[in-house]
Image: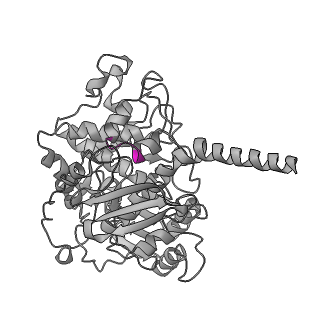
Amino acid sequence: MKKIRRIILLFLVGLILLVTFYAWPRLPIITGFAAKGMCSGVFVGHRTPQSISARELSFFPISLAHTTVHPEDSSVTATLLGLAKRKAIYRSGLGSALIADMPEEKIRSQAFTLPRPPFDPDTVDWPLGSVMPDTLFPGLQYARLDSLLHAAIDPSGSEPLKKTLAVAVVYNNVLAGEAYAPGIDKNTPLLGWSMTKSIINALTGLRVAGKKLKINGPAPVPEWRKDKRHNITLNSLLHMTSGLKWDENYFDISDATKMLYVFGDMYQYAVSRPFAYPPDSVWYYSSGTTNILSGIIRYTFRSDRDYKTFPYTKLFYRTGMLHATIEADASGTFVGSSYSYATARDWARFGMLYLNHGIFSGDTILRPEWIDYTLSQAPHSEGAYGAQWWLNHNNKLPDAPDDTYFCDGFQGQRVFVIPSKKLVVVRLGWSMKDFDFNTFLKEIISTLPAQ
């Protein structure tokens, strides 16, 4: 009997230690993820809590969190077994942010009204607007393409397997096909996760063209001027070769998860990371690096309002991305690493901007040389990465052309650009475990006219 009691006691002690030293520190990250995801999904994506819980928040351990939506003050709270309560709030013009180490009143005071788009999309032709042309390309297998796109969506009422929310294909600048999961349509903004990094590429390119930033000069970060980090350039940051110490792990306590779910000022957290390697000597994918870029962009503006409207007036509205939102953290800096919402059509438009070498509907938004720079291989990335865009030079997609490049987001968000095929392919979802991107692209390419 004493032996059994001793075993039970040891088990209880072990359980207490497990909860204290392993589980407890992770609970606020779990509930923070749930609160932020639900808040943005409801108030930015305009979706039902049931849809978000069943999809984006359905994986372990996030599924353990309980979320409550508070429409009266545009907020969401999340707990796990009644513990580790976290709150996220929605701010007009800036999206949602977690309450962390800053007062809620200060965060709410950042809300502002975005400028209205300069046109009604229902009266303007594609791609700037939503009026579709009658163009039909000889040789394009429309029926087969439509079948492929709908096959990427799990049938209504079935067990989710491919877990796709939306797919869209643009061929030769015309929307050739699209398909949506139940409850999602052409007007539903969906989270791009790290595809936001490629948006930061565009915003950086605009500031470089406006002579507000220099690619090869020292990055304008005051905290780095008097230590080993002073040699980090904008080029190093864009190519993910800054040499800063960083841990990019989304499934545990890491620099990435602490930045996103513990600290209100993500830029300040990222720039505080110490020197680890000489700049440009090591390639390492880092969400912190992109939030440093976002903060650098912010401080090129004299007015904070000019900064907040900049992505809309200079990028989104000029490309017809009228449903797009880039969210800011609690300090008001855009979370360039992770938090942008846009419809499948909007993401396709973004891909078209790069497909057409920075020109959209006759408007030169990004300089052609910026697109060339974007596709320059990051040192030591083995052909996998450019400047905030992924490349296919490492043959990760063996059945896609070598000139394929793409935005890549957590849970399988993708915008593929294939210049040699005049093609943009978008896939948005909540998992990529059972979704084969290589086969998907191969089959889509097989429906195109012979070249």
Q: Position of residue 230 (x, y in %)?
A: 33, 20
Q: Position of residue 118 (x, y in %)?
A: 12, 65
Q: Position of residue 394 (x, y in %)?
A: 55, 43
Visible residue check, residue 124: yes
SS majority, magenta: loop
Q: Is residue 295 above or below residue 165?
A: above
Residue 301 location, quadrant: top left
Q: Is residue 361 left or right of residue 231?
A: left
Q: Is residue 346 left or right of residue 120?
A: right
Q: Position of residue 146 (x, y in %)?
A: 47, 78
Q: Is residue 96 left or right of residue 252?
A: left
Q: Which residues are magenta?
A: 260-265
Q: Is residue 337 left or right of residue 319?
A: right
Residue 312 location, quadrant: bottom left
Q: Does residue 298 belong to the magenta stretch?
A: no
Residue at point 61%, 47% (across, down): 19
In this rendering, the count of numbered labels is: 0
Residue at point 30%, 16% (across, down): 226
Q: Does residue 261 belong to the magenta stretch?
A: yes
As drawn, the residue found furthest toward the front would be 2
Identify which residue, 173 or 44, lies in the foreground.
44
Identify which residue, 223 or 175, lies in the foreground.
223
Q: How are the colours assigned in the image? A: one colour
